[in-house]
Amino acid sequence: MNGPAFFPPSQQLLGDALLAAGRPREALAAYDRTLALHPLLARSLLGAARAAKAAGEVGAARERYAALAKLWQAADADLAALDEARAAPKLTAAAQSRR
């Protein structure tokens, strides 16, 4: 029986739940706690970018998307989240109006 290569950190799972519950600022804090221990964890970078974007923190979203795009520079071109990360430079203050 094969399981996952590793289990996601609890703070990442908390971030996922908080983001799904519409609490992006709290989600961002949870993802950032994971990233403090595992700075190259792609799933946490993606979650943090999405949470920052949802919270209207455009600069933080761009920073995390940029880190993810760099990490995934050799990823499969059809990876949907890669397109999302590459579009980050186009984020504007308009995202802040969605708060």
Image (cartoon, rainbow, N blue to C red):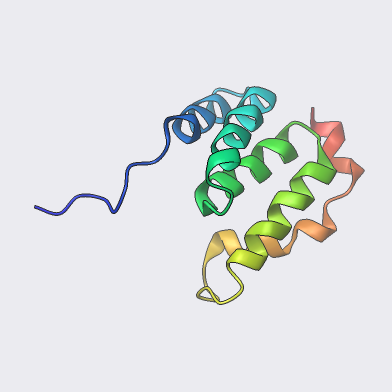
Q: Position of residue 95 (x, y in %)?
A: 82, 40
Q: In this view, does 21 lie to the left or right of 98?
A: left
Viewer-side residue, 15 vs 98: 15
Q: Residue at x 60, y 65 (%)?
A: 71
Image height of 7 relative to 29, above or below: below
Image height of 17 relative to 87, above or below: above
Q: Residue at x 80, y 32 (%)?
A: 98
Q: Residue at x 60, y 48 (%)?
A: 45
Q: Position of residue 49 (x, y in %)?
A: 67, 45
Residue 67 visible to an observer of this rendering? yes
* Residue farthest along the right direction in this orientation: 93
Residue 84 visible to an observer of this rendering? no
Image height of 18 relative to 65, above or below: above
> Which image quadrant for residue 72?
bottom right
Viewer-side residue, 20 vs 61: 61
Viewer-side residue, 54 vs 31: 31
Q: Is residue 8 left or right of residue 84?
A: left
> Which image quadrant for residue 89?
bottom right
> Which image quadrant for residue 85?
bottom right
Q: Position of residue 52 (x, y in %)?
A: 72, 37
Q: Where is residue 53 in the image (x, y as percent from the top left)?
A: 74, 40
Image height of 68 relative to 47, above or below: below
